[in-house]
Amino acid sequence: MAVGNKGLTDAIRYDLRLLHETWMGLFYPRQRNAEDTVLGKYRPDGTAKLFAYRALSAFGILIVGILYPLLLTGYFVRFQARKLNVTAARLGLIGVIAVFVMLWGGLVALIWFGFSDTFTTVEIIAIAAAGGVAVVSSALSYAFWRIGGRGTTVLLAYPFAMTALFLPPIVAALLHPALEDIIIARSDEMARWMFQNGPDALTEPLDRFDRQESHHVIIWFAISFPVGWVLGSLVTLADLIRPKGE
């Protein structure tokens, strides 16, 4: 146990040092992992320059304190994303599409043949449309991930992956009363909070919008993009501090 604690402490110290050196590297050369190099870590000469260097270093401690919890979140998200990537890579694009088509197609078929007297044709079409969006989103997420590039992955692959993950529970909540009381009610509270605290130019027309339960599919499709950008940015931070393989 003592060895494990020591290893964890060393890992935390390593991360904190790299975070601070990365921050200082934005302003000065030879900051990150430069102590044991031939030239060593750069330090300015002259009283004024040295004071500015130390002041920026002290301010960096505050930056590190803010970023470190986000870095840990980035490690966790990256770990989960890697497991999904391994599965997606094994399935391939056709396999990913086939899995989502079977899931959503089976759901729509179950509703059509088993609950057609409960749901109207319009509602069934809406559920099928949500399934279509999830299938297309999963395919786009896979395609953009395969294209590669940090910008493409963060801006497009992560948001479409979030869409494919968010829509199934929302649609399930529309079909199941117990889930509806939990998911839709919480979703409506969040939407109300967003409308009350968001920019007036965006929320004023939305506030007049007569929000129905089925509209939560659209709401979560929109939410998936900023959520995907945030998660992608956290993984980028994790890759910056500890690149893959470290």
Image: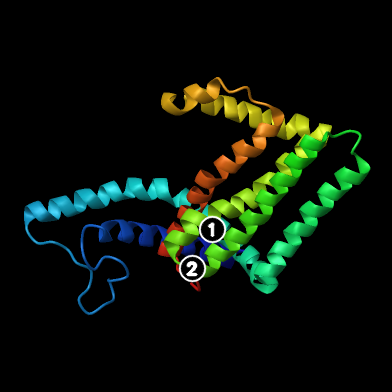
Gap in Å between the C-alphas at discs 2 and 1? 9 Å
The mark found on residue 24 in the picture is none
Colour basis: rainbow
- Vertical position of residue 189 compared to residue 112: above or below: above
> Tag 2, which secondary structure?
loop
Q: Look at label 1 and name its amino acid.
A: Ala
Instruction: Work out which residue is located at the far front of the displayed protein and give it.
Output: 121
In this rendering, would 246 be left or right of 64?
A: right
Count how many numbered circles sit on residues in the image: 2
Quick check: marks 2 and 1 in contact, CB under 8 Å?
no
Q: Name the residue under label 1.
A: 157
Query: As rendered, which of 46 and 188 lies closer to the eye?
Result: 188
Spot occupied by residue 128 in the image (x, y as percentages of width and height): 75, 46
- Vertical position of residue 30 compared to residue 77: above or below: below
Quadrant that contains the N terminus: bottom right
> Tag 1, which secondary structure?
helix
Q: Name the residue under label 2.
A: 148
Q: Look at label 2 and name its amino acid.
A: Gly
